[in-house]
Image: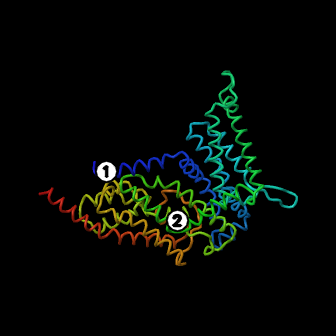
Amino acid sequence: MSKVENFSDKALGIASKVQGNNYLRAISNGLMATLPINILGSISLLLSVLPVPFWQSFVTSIGIKPYLSMGYSVTVGVISVYAAFLIGYQLADNFNQKPLPAGLLSLFSFLVLTPLITVGDVTTLDSSKLGATGLFAAMISALLFSRLYCFIMEKGIGIKMPESVPQFVSDVFAGLIPVIIAGSLAILLSYLFGMTTYGSFSDFVYTIIATPLTNLSSNVGSMVLIVFIQMFLWFFGIHGSNVVSSFITGLYLPMDVANMDALQAGVANSELPNILGKSFYDLFAGIGGAGGTLSLVIVILVFAKAQQSKAVANLSLVPGFFTINEPMVFGLPLVLNPLMAIPFILTPIAQVLVAYFGISSGLFPRLSGIQVPFGTPIGINGFIAGGWRITLLQILCVLVGCLIYFPFVKMSDKRARLNEIEITE
């Protein structure tokens, strides 16, 4: 076995372990499951704050603007509530336990661990901790108490009902004791944290974990590193995008939600708190798919002469506009192709840097954080996320990618043409 093959096998093994980790998978799948709610809230926010005077006059005159704002407030505005349930649900499912009680327990635990505030004579939950601020607390409490529920269930601690009892009723009673034990511990934990200087578990997590992670993820270097790892894995045929998805969602979705919260509160675009976010990653970290292969397709179609390369590019053009690039990655191929390794890895990193400095300089607007469904055509997704100037920035990034790919395509095309001539002769 060659050193390259040996390294590839080791990398595949590590990536498989990361991708198959029950806890990371629960976070990734749980947060991904909030996507419909995120999109619904994003649409509501977009319609509520769309900066078009005619539209604002219209939605205000017919009285629908408050309801559009409510559509955002009860979705993205309380995203941690949905995340707590779904992450706990996914984790229990990963451990082959009944997921619904675990999801409800996770939600209960998160709410119990959320700080209280007193307004007048009424004491209630601090609603500000139910949105982006509480997302890390939701993740941790969901993992902690859902796993505890699974552990107790695995030990067989529960109420066993006679076989004559309907299965649904039997399942409810089987999970009753685990839920009571775990839920009681959540209440105790909330009480104990209430006696600390942090005041609550949620504030503790935000101070100790969320704030450092937010500072890390707000640095463009962290996204460059993640993209590099993603593309390094792709080069060896490992689906790097799937491997890093849990990190991207966990680190950067809260930043999008913070931007949307600020936008809902009337903050100007230039004052939005974050440049980076999951939306930024989706729009710029590889336009047309991992490796920024839309640029490669364009360069091949315009400059290449080898028939095989042009055939693959023709096949990849339309899917590339919808961020589907497997035909190019495995058809050209780019996997284990040493000549194309440099542009394949470098292009998405360059596109991230160009977009970041373009936005940080003020030449292009900050992204609102609005979540655009995967598969929305390139250009249209940019327009939805930030207007026509973001679409223009995407085009600029594609052109940068073309410049990076061009010399390597010329070299690769020369080889391919020589091979085709030899075959025909």
**Residue shown at 53%/48% (left/top)?**
25
Label 2, secondary structure: give it.
helix
In this view of the protein, which residue sits in the foreground, 414 or 336? 336
Q: Determine whether label 1 and label 2 are within 8 Å by CB.
A: no
The kind of residue tagged 1 is: Glu
Q: Residue 278 location in percent, x, y?
A: 54, 61
The kind of residue tagged 2 is: Phe
Say the numbered circle drawn on residue 30: none
- Residue 71 in view (yes/no): no
Label 1, secondary structure: give it.
helix
Residue picked out by circle 2: 280
**Residue shown at 70%/39% (left/top)?**
179
**In the image, farthest residue toward the right:** 121
Q: Residue 206 location in percent, x, y?
A: 66, 60
Question: Which quarter of the rendering shows the C terminus?
Answer: bottom left
The quadrant where residue 102 appears: top right
Residue picked out by circle 1: 5
